[in-house]
Amino acid sequence: MNSLSPGRNLILIGMMGSGKSAVGLLLAERLGRPFADTDAMVEAQAGRSVAAIFADEGERGFRILESEAIRRVSVLRGQVVSVGGGAVEDGRNVTHLRATGDLVLLTASAAVLAARTLEGASSRAEGSTDPEQRPLLEAAGDDVGARAQVLAELWERRRPAYEAAAATSVDTGGRSANEVRDAVLAWAANVPGLLTPAEMKAQP
Ligand code: S3P
């Protein structure tokens, strides 16, 4: 990499409620990079919410649009990217993302994830519009235990795909978004080609 070429994409993966959007925004701000959220890209492209796409075209229809968004985002470098929780289940998505980026898995217990997905006011302020973006949790309603159960089952199914895709993982339980951002940056600084020399200098 010469000193002017952009670094590889810094890509956050993980379950709903793992903090991808909140931490992604903080990382983008710190690095001076654009932030791309594939759920938001899908909504902009379709002109509808994630929930409306699920309702109209089913999860399969949503996954097709999500894969298109991932292909588009993977063409460029120098971004911070957050992808929806289910994206890693399609190996082609992972291949595209890894071509131009390094993937960081954000984790937390099912109980913590469930509680975060119910933090309506704060998460909405950061750009999430649950339940508009999380139809997979709709049947569980506002019951934190029922949400945790759904999330635990999804995690068990997805775990091998997450772990195979990720270059590292960061536990977000009991950590603030700023602390998670700093942990990701400390790791990223040692990955060849991920941060530019200028971005490394911007580290505190
Ligand atoms: C999904 C997660 C959501 C969104 C969609 C499906 C999933 O994104 O893509 O509701 O399958 O886990 P977040 O992980 O950003 O909530």
Image (cartoon, rainbow, N blue to C red):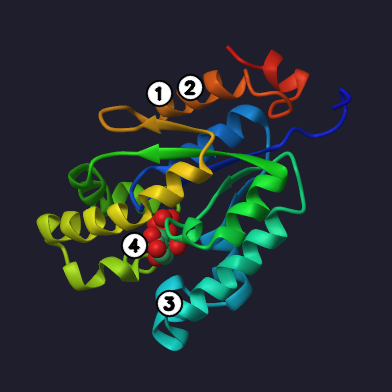
Read off the residue under disc 3. 59
Q: Sequence-wise, which precedes: disc 2 or disc 4?
A: 4
What whole-number distance in Å separates the C-alpha atoms at marks 2 and 3? 34 Å
Label 4 amino acid?
Asp
Query: Residue 161: where, in percent of width, then height?
Result: 45, 51
Is mark 1 in CB contact (under 8 Å) with mark 2? yes
Binning the other alpha carbons within 10 Å of mark 4 as few (below 14), some (14 to 19) or many (20 upward) gives: some
Residue 200 at least partly seen: yes
Q: Is residue 51 above or below residue 186?
A: below
Q: Is the residue indicated by label 3 positioned so its CB lies within 8 Å of ligand 1?
A: yes
Give SS at disc 4: loop
Label 2 amino acid?
Asp
Q: Sequence-wise, which precedes: disc 2 or disc 3?
A: 3
Label 3 amino acid?
Glu
Binning the other alpha carbons within 10 Å of mark 2 as few (below 14), some (14 to 19) or many (20 upward) gives: some
Q: Nearer the viewer, mark 2 or mark 4?
A: 2
What whole-number distance in Å separates the C-alpha atoms at marks 1 and 2? 5 Å
Read off the residue under disc 2. 182
Which residue is rendered at x = 46% and y = 37% of the image? Answer: 23
Query: Residue 70: where, in percent of width, then height?
Result: 63, 60
What whole-number distance in Å separates the C-alpha atoms at marks 2 and 4? 26 Å
Which residue is rendered at x = 70% and y = 26% of the image? Answer: 195
Q: In the rendered view of the protein, which quadrant contains the C terminus?
A: top right
Which residue is rendered at x = 36% and y = 49% of the image? Answer: 159
